[in-house]
Image (spheres, grey):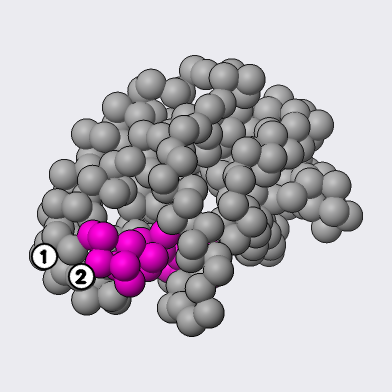
């Protein structure tokens, strides 16, 4: 009897599932701040907020780092992966967001190491445990995606979509929208996600950029809050 051994689609489901213990569900990406300050109140404003995050930070920085890390993993180039990791870490200006990305990345690589014996992943994991690489989430996602046979562009889609779900999930728990409205936002953002991956899929690491000063201030404000539901 023939048995299909291509588990790449199942691997996408596993890594992107909220059941996967990466901790993404604990992040609002600054939405909690603008909610508390009543700066965003409508569904359209939430969608625009996520659109800004994708086009000005996640796309030109996280997506580029992920795809380059994927390519370095394909070449068994651990030094290249670490270069991606350190470059991305240096561009995350807000400590709260930077630390959260590293915690999520650390959790992801620990989990995947539990069921993978890939040597590139093991060498990278050893460098992370020795504090030689910070383990940012996008870079770890790129490496783990390659190891698990996930297609290159699909890895980027998964990461950006996961960010969208994280923010929409936070909005849902904050009582800003209902389940149907949240799914409508995710549907409406599909063209933005697709265009972003197409725009940055062939960019080299040196071309990473970001410019969202107001969003940075929102994240910094959240960092100083005494009481909060979400990590970011």
Asked if the stretch drawn in magenta spans residue 33, the answer is yes
State the residue lying farthest toward the right.
130
* Coordinates of residue 60 in the picture (x, y in percent): 47, 30
Question: Residue 43 at what x, y percent from top left?
Answer: 15, 58
Location of residue 122 with respect to 111 vertically, above or below: above
Up-down relation of residue 50 to residue 87 (above or below): below
- Horizontally, residue 45 falls left or right of residue 141, namely left
Image spot of residue 94 (x, y percent): 59, 52
Which disc is residue 225 wearing? none
- The residue range painted magenta reads 20-40
Mark 2 residue crowding within 10 angstroms, few (<14) / some (14–19) / many (20+): some
Residue under the point 73% across and 39% down: 86
- Residue drawn at (28%, 75%), measured in percent from left and top? 174
Nearer to us in this view, 176 or 105: 176
Q: Whole-Å distance between the Cαs marked 2 and 1?
A: 12 Å
Q: Residue, x 17% and y 48% (percent of image)?
A: 187
Q: Residue at x 23, y 55 (%)?
A: 46
Q: Residue furthest bottom?
A: 227
* Residue 168 visible within the image: yes
Dot label at residue 180: 1
- Secondary element at image label 1: helix
Identify the secondary structure beneath mark 2.
loop
Magenta-span inclusion, residue 42: no
**Residue 34 position by quadrant:** bottom left
Label 2: which residue?
176
Q: Picture coordinates of residue 196 (x, y %)?
A: 35, 29
């Amino acid at each position: 009897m023939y048995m299909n051994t291509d588990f790449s689609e199942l691997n996408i489901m596993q890594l992107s599932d909220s059941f996967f213990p990466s901790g993404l569900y604990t992040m609002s990406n600054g939405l909690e701040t603008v909610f508390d300050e009543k700066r965003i109140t409508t569904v359209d404003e939430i969608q625009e907020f996520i659109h800004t995050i994708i086009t000005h930070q996640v796309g030109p920085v996280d997506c580029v780092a992920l795809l380059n890390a994927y390519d370095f993993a394909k070449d068994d180039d651990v030094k290249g992966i670490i270069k991606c990791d350190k470059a991305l870490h240096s561009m995350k200006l807000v400590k709260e967001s930077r630390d959260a990305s590293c915690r999520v990345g650390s959790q992801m690589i620990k989990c995947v190491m539990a069921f993978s014996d890939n040597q590139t992943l093991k060498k990278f994991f050893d460098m992370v445990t020795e504090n030689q690489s910070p383990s940012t989430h996008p870079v770890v996602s790129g490496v783990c995606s390659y190891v698990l046979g996930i297609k290159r562009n699909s890895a980027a889609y998964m990461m950006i979509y996961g960010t969208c779900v994280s923010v929409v999930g936070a909005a849902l728990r904050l009582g800003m929208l209902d389940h149907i409205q949240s799914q409508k936002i995710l549907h409406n953002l599909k063209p933005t996600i697709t265009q972003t991956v197409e725009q940055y899929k062939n960019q080299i690491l040196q071309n990473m950029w970001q410019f969202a000063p107001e969003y940075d201030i929102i994240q910094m404000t959240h960092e100083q809050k005494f009481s909060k539901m979400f990590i970011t």
